[in-house]
Image (spheres, rainbow, N blue to C red):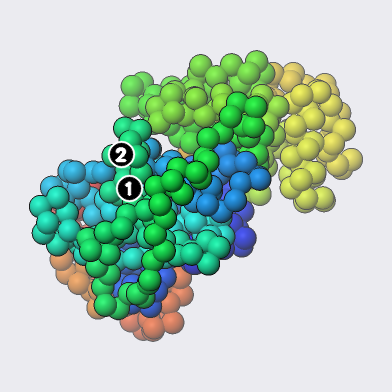
Amino acid sequence: MIRARNTVELEKNYKLSQIDDEEQVVIKGGLDKEKYNRERYERRVTYSGRDIKNIITKMREIEANIPDEWNDWQKAKYIYETIGKNVSYDYKYFEAGRHQQDSNLTTILSGKAVCAGYALLFKEMMDRQNIECEYIRGEALGNNDNPEKHAWNNITIDGKTIALDVTWDSARISKGAKIEYFGNNTRFNERHVADLDERQFNYFVLSDEDVKSINTNISRNDRVYVADKMDLETKRVFVENAIDETYKKYSKLQGTDKAKKQVKAALMKYVEEGYSKYFTNNGGARDNIQKYVSQGEMSEIVSNIFVDSISRDEKFKDKREALNEENILRKATKDTLEKYNKEQAVLAIKRYINQDSPSGFTNSANRAELTIKDKDVIMNNMYDNIVEYTEISRERENETKELIREKNCYNSYELQYIAQKEKSKGVLNECLDWMVKKKEKDIEKEEIDNLQKIANDRTDKTRINEIDEYKR
């Protein structure tokens, strides 16, 4: 599990591409106050590696539109307007019971939020701009003048602390109406009452003219193009998402084998011709590829994924045969990776893809074979490796999701409870494997041996369907 105070700290300590999709990532963000550090808030601020990478990528996309010369007032107002315009209030939240999704950072992906989601997202994006911001919890008087649980923010710029409520302004922003809660509402404190254990503020009130004078218009001449400001790591997230969305779509329509062929064809077509139509546009996947990833960048991203499929072999050793150890490009890449580093291996593959030259590989690699052999066959094998590698990652993620109460199996009592309730050797062994792997200090070897004995005794195969239904 990875823990960070916010996404700024996460990016400082980790490269996004190094975070596994199934990794659990805790981002405290606005809920980093001591009073919030309770179990239900812990669940709320825990994300999968895949989600947090997509969240950060979306944030970077918004940030890339901000001109370098803007001041903090412009940055804050622009982000306030962007969230208000692109995230709508989820009125079905309570009946659907989506208590976590609509109140954390995933709202930037779903486009749906309740007040907590709006406020947490705004706070996180202010942290990324190094603008002082608070996440405030309390009660507010809604349309019926009855007090309701609510969350909002304040920011401090140039020594002035203003109160703002992006939730209440969201509908106005979407309609192009005047903003009323960006520090310019004289009755804000009458309708918003912070909890007593929140820090209390004396707010500065902006005039409507003050707010209007904060220019957030980006003219065509001054526009900062998103693709130019994004780093390759961010663009790789777009590519991985396009692979995933394409695979999911075609596996449902035509089965997994044809889905893999579709993904392979999509990558090959884009690298060789810059043609993106083989990717699905589900979730905007194809549009993101076209907008943000050039043909040349796709070659480098594909090279990076291929190198990762080799350097992480040990982790996926149970699938090593599927990764085709006999591929000569794979051998040359592995030799280069071991003698030099990942950067050199990526450069060598990219040069081979674009220039047909094997000169970037180490001399110990059989570079002559790469020159003599049919390049189309070699490239076909490379894409097979990439597709299999991404499929392995996806399987690992699904296995993690399906592991019964994995993260709750902290002691032998919980394990025994599961054993008694489910009477399943498979379920108990999954928990035991996880416990042994994690080497939890509070579980004695004797207890594990006893539990293993219990597991060995659970052979009632008539319960398999029941267990599968429980997992689902």
Secondary structure beneath disc 1?
A: loop
Q: Amino acid at mark 2?
A: Arg
Q: Is 378 or 47 nearer to us in this picture?
A: 47
Compared with 133, 305 (above or below) is above
Where is residue 349? Give x, y as percent: 75, 34
Q: Which residue is mark 1?
A: 180
- The vertical placement of 471 against 91, above or below, is below
In front of the other: 418 or 449: 418
Looking at the picture, which amino acid does disc 1 mark?
A: Glu
The residue drawn where x is 10% and y is 52% is 144
- The answer to whether marks 1 and 2 mark residues whose Cβ atoms lie closer than 8 Å is yes
Residue 369: name its quadrant. top right
Tell me which corner region of the image, top left, top right, bottom left or bottom right, holds residue 422.
bottom left
Q: Which residue is mark 2?
A: 172
Q: Is residue 1 visible?
A: no
Tell me, for residue 267, which label it has, or none: none
Quarter where residue 460 is shown: bottom left
